[in-house]
């Protein structure tokens, strides 16, 4: 090992030690608790039970209390809710973000001001925006119900975040409103790097703008667009705060992270909650690998 490599490791050592203390050790401890029967009231009395938290009689992936099968269990419902939220919200945010990015990429008066204003929803903390929309969607005095009544679009007030039939869609709508600027920003950055020669040649040849988009723009931004989708998908799969504030972790909208919090903090079942958090980590990692393989996305060039 030469002096340059040794010096590099010397500078990296404090960061590696810090990461081991604040990230690696808690992760390993959580994985260990997943194989034990640990309660928050008595952390020292941990009893090793192997895979019972995962596949035991009352484990995550098998529970005789639910005659309708795995997808009727709490964990199955949480997985279904999380993926429903992630797929729908990320798809809508990608389409909306692409449209906003294409508009912001055009030259017009006041473009800088508009670009800054578009980022405001994303800059608002999630808890604040969720609470704000919670008041706006309130069934009794929310402004959304009042506007829809005034416009004659509904006959009576709707409990948007309390009704199981509308709660998830309300959460998705709020998330799309908040996170579309993030997708638009990433896509806009990709659009800014495109060569101008192709567009000038297409304009001279009289090619229709839609054809230019499908044949030139979209193929050129495909890679950064899919990378943006990967980052947003990973973030959506671990959603907790938005659902918790808007719907109070109701069973119709509870996410995997919400179930982990409920079991570990509210119920005190550290062992079972750790098994759920370990499963959540594996599910997100597997989802990322499958998506990257399916779309052939390269997060870094060699």
Image: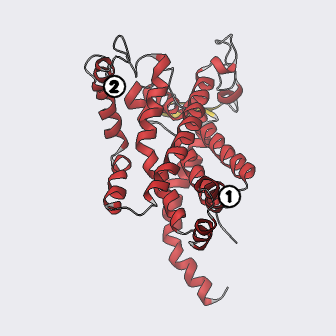
Q: Quadrant of the C terminus?
A: bottom right
Q: Residue at x 46, y 51 (%)?
A: 100
Nearer to the camera, 6 or 140: 140
Q: Please provide percent x and percent y for residue 14.
A: 48, 70
Viewer can see residue 250: no
Camera-near label (1 vs 2) is 1
Q: What residue did someone put label 1 on?
A: 215
Ranked by sequence position, the earlier of labels 1 and 2 is 2
Q: Secondary structure at mark 1?
A: helix
Q: Position of residue 117 (x, y in %)?
A: 32, 53
Q: Residue at x 59, y 23 (%)?
A: 77
Dividing the picture into quarters, in which one does residue 66 lie? top right
Image side of residue 131 versus residue 180, left or right: left
Quarter of the rendering occupied by the N terminus: bottom right
Q: Would you name the residue on which mark 2 appears?
A: 137
- What is the secondary structure assignment of the residue under circle 2? loop
> Residue 243 or 214: which is nearer the viewer?
214
């Amino acid at each position: 090992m030469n002096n340059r490599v040794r010096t590099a490791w010397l500078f990296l050592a404090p960061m590696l030690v810090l990461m081991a203390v604040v990230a690696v050790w808690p992760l390993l401890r959580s994985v260990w608790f997943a194989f034990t029967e640990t309660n928050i009231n008595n952390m020292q009395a941990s009893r090793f039970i192997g895979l019972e938290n995962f596949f035991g009689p009352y484990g995550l992936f098998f529970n005789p209390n639910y005659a309708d099968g795995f997808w009727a269990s709490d964990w199955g419902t949480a997985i279904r809710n999380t993926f429903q939220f992630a797929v729908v919200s990320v798809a809508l945010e990608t389409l909306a973000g692409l449209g906003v990015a294409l508009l912001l990429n055009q030259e017009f008066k006041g473009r800088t001001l508009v670009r800054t204003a578009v980022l405001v929803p994303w800059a608002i903390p999630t808890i604040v925006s969720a609470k704000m929309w919670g008041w706006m969607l309130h069934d009794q005095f929310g402004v959304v119900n009042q506007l829809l009544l005034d416009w004659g679009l509904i006959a009576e007030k709707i409990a948007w975040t309390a009704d199981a039939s509308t709660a998830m869609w309300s959460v998705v709508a709020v998330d799309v409103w908040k996170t579309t600027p993030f997708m638009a920003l990433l896509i806009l950055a990709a659009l800014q790097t495109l060569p101008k020669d192709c567009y000038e040649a297409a304009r001279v040849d009289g090619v229709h703008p839609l054809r230019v988009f499908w044949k030139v723009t979209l193929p050129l931004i495909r890679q950064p667009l899919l990378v943006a989708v990967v980052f947003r998908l990973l973030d959506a799969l671990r959603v907790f705060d938005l659902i918790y504030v808007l719907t109070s972790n109701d069973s119709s909208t509870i996410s995997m992270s919400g179930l982990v919090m409920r079991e570990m903090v509210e119920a005190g079942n550290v062992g079972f909650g750790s098994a759920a958090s370990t499963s959540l980590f594996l599910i997100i990692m597997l989802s990322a690998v499958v998506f990257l393989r399916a779309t052939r996305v390269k997060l870094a060039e060699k």
